[in-house]
Image: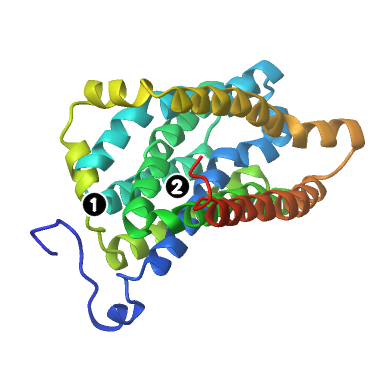
Amino acid sequence: MNKQDNTFTPIGGLDRLRTGVPSYALALLTAVSFFNYLDRMVIAILLEPIKQELDLSDAQMGLIAGFAFAILYAVLGLPLARIADRRSRITLISICLVVWSTMTAVTGLARNFFELFAARMAVGVGEAGCVPAAHSILGDLFPRERRAFAISIFQAGGVLGQSVGLALAGLAAQLWGWRVALFIVGLLGIPLMLLIFFTVREPVRSKEHAQASAESMMATLKALFVRPPLVHLVLGVAVASFGSYGMIQWLPAFFIRTHGLSLAEVGLYIGITGTIGGVVGTVFGGYALTRLGPRDVR
């Protein structure tokens, strides 16, 4: 361990991975994004079998799928982002990945509504620190003119998690049951944590980043929210997320109930449409910003 920056330096064969290269860190962070979105959304494809086995209502399933996750995910996002500003972001992402992956697997052990609710809250706790830390790392690894495209690649990993990942989870649930599907999805994230923690170096923070991290949280919030464009963006994304996540959570159940599709079929259709529309759109958006940014920063 390097005592000065509290990060691990790869040794032997791992050194050949050239962990200082931004593209390598981006690839691993994109994989983290894949599991981040898969683990938060996997419950959507499993709503029907969970509801039937545990004899729960739609209201209870809605609380488990959405509210239980969102309440701590939203509340803890700010303090964990603050930790990312001041401490090792690689360590934070590694810890968060272990927490949400483990709790996703633990969800498969739930026997009633309250245990499911508690497990989903714990998943939200772990996932709250991922995106702020990852965006901070990408901000230090990539110059401004390439940053939008790098973030679009990272976000495309999340779209793949919501599409291809859900398709595989649906197939696993149909073959072996929803509990096994949650075990598989959760435990797959653990090896990725080891790879990130031992092979990715903590990037050097920019001078501006270091200065901003020394401010109090209230000073930072005041500096941010006096900017109308940021306020509009936050409100707009909040409203859009409210609608889109609410729809995505119930879309598989709708197709199963109304059209009689199996878990594997629903997963396949979600995988195809999500990959074509979501991934292509996300990556193209980042590319377009990279090309158009020099013309007009807005």
Residue plotted at (20% across, 69% down): 9
Residue 75 visible somewhere in the drawing: yes
Find residue 161 and report its horizontal and vertical position in percent.
60, 51
Q: Return the disc, 1 or 2, that comes first in the chain's sequence.
A: 2
Q: Please, is residue 197 above or below residue 217 in the view? A: below
Mark 2: few/some/many CA within 10 Å (<14, 14-19, 20+):
many
Find residue 129 and report its horizontal and vertical position in percent.
36, 39
Question: Which color scheme did the rendering employ for the protein?
Answer: rainbow
Residue plotted at (47% across, 32% down): 119
Dot 1 falls on a residue whose secondary structure is loop
Q: Please, is residue 237 above or below residue 85 in the view? A: above
**Residue ranking furthest to the front:** 295
| Numbered disc in front, either 1 or 2 | 1
Looking at numbered disc 1 in the image, what kind of residue is underneath it? Ser
The mark found on residue 206 in the picture is 1
The mark found on residue 101 in the picture is 2
